[in-house]
Amino acid sequence: MKLVSFSTHQGLSFGVVSDDSIVDLGKRLDGRYADLKALIAADALGEAAQAAQSAQGDYPLSEVTLLPVIPNPEQIFCVGLNYAEHVKETNRETTEQPVIFMRLPASQVGHEQPMLRPPESQQFDYEGEIAVIIGRAGRRIAEADAWNHIAGYACYNDGSVRDWQRHTTQWGPGKNFYRTGAFGPWMVTSDEIEPNALMTLITRLNGQEVQRATTQMLIHGIAKQIAYLSTFTPLAPGDVIVTGTPGGVGAKRNPPLFMKPGDRVEVEVDRIGVLSNPIADEA
């Protein structure tokens, strides 16, 4: 099942993607759930599937604005330096534990919404990644049980303002400019992607492949990430874990390859779909 958050002229809602249309769950579930995060927290994905079964779409997919899959997460955790090729190109060392930084919800856009290059920098870089959406709350989750806490998976672009990222050893500013990241196009529920499934990640800039990796190449796997994060803080339904980017980032190419207005960047994960965004300057 593919779940989305979206907006129309009637307001915000969430639903199931069925072929080229969306079944509006906000309407069909009689407003019992405020948003997709609330649906996940209520463990109501089965109810959502039943409501969407054999239903006619309420809106053509092309006529809605897709929002970040979870527009209002309590926590967005990002894992850095988690593919060996990326560690090598950044001249860093592999760490025994995951490198963690945070993103803010306002730093994200949805599928087909412009990622914005801020006026303070020309060094706007792509980072294709796989995102995990937490479905069941937990603290100190064992790796063996981690898969039971996943609601689903999505594509992610951890758009980075590189010079601001390098201001200090803390990466936060360069990772949190307004509307620089992208999250979508939808969440594929975990019942369709088995635990520890092999997934292939590809990033393209203007149709040219710039990154490719598989989940087998992760230094710290998804289960370990969940176990590690849940040790220092409780994980809640709707929390997002962005699992790391492979080598090939624009800042480490010769010459550097940064995104500019008029470009289009795509993040494709074979078991999920394609997240596509144009690049524009922030007004």
Image (tube, rainbow, N blue to C red):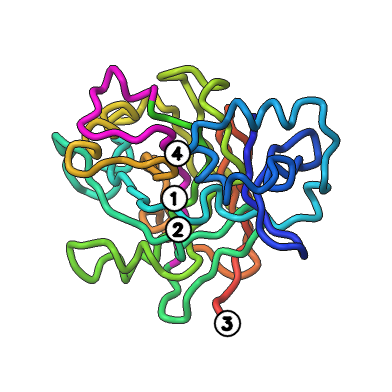
Q: Residues within 10 Å of mark 3 (few under 14, many from 20)?
A: few
Amino acid type at circle 3 is Ala
- Closer to the N terminus: mark 4 or mark 2? 4
Quarter occupied by the C terminus = bottom right
Question: Contact, CB < 8 Å: mark 1 with mark 2?
Answer: yes
Quarter occupied by the N terminus = top right
Q: Residues within 10 Å of mark 4 (few under 14, many from 20)?
A: many
Circle 1 or circle 4, nearest the eye: 4
- Closer to the N terminus: mark 1 or mark 4? 1
For the residue labelled by badge 3, is the local secondary structure a helix, a strand or a loop? Answer: loop
Q: Which residue is mark 4?
A: 133
Amino acid type at circle 4 is Ile
Task: Give the image location of residue 57, x and y in percent.
Answer: 83, 40
Question: Contact, CB < 8 Å: mark 3 with mark 1?
Answer: no
Is 33 situated above or below 83? below
Q: CA distance from mark 4 to mark 2?
A: 19 Å
For the residue labelled by badge 1, is the local secondary structure a helix, a strand or a loop? Answer: loop
Q: CA distance from mark 1 to mark 4?
A: 18 Å
Instruction: Looking at the picture, tell me which residue is in the foreground, 80 or 186.
Output: 186
Instruction: Looking at the picture, tell me which residue is in the foreground, 76 or 39.
Output: 39
Q: Which residue is mark 2?
A: 159
Picture residue at 24% right of the left edge, 39% below the top: 229
Q: Residues within 10 Å of mark 1 (few under 14, many from 20)?
A: many
Q: Is residue 266 visible?
A: yes
Q: Which residues are magenta?
A: 124-148
For the residue labelled by badge 2, is the local secondary structure a helix, a strand or a loop? Answer: loop
Amino acid type at circle 1 is Glu
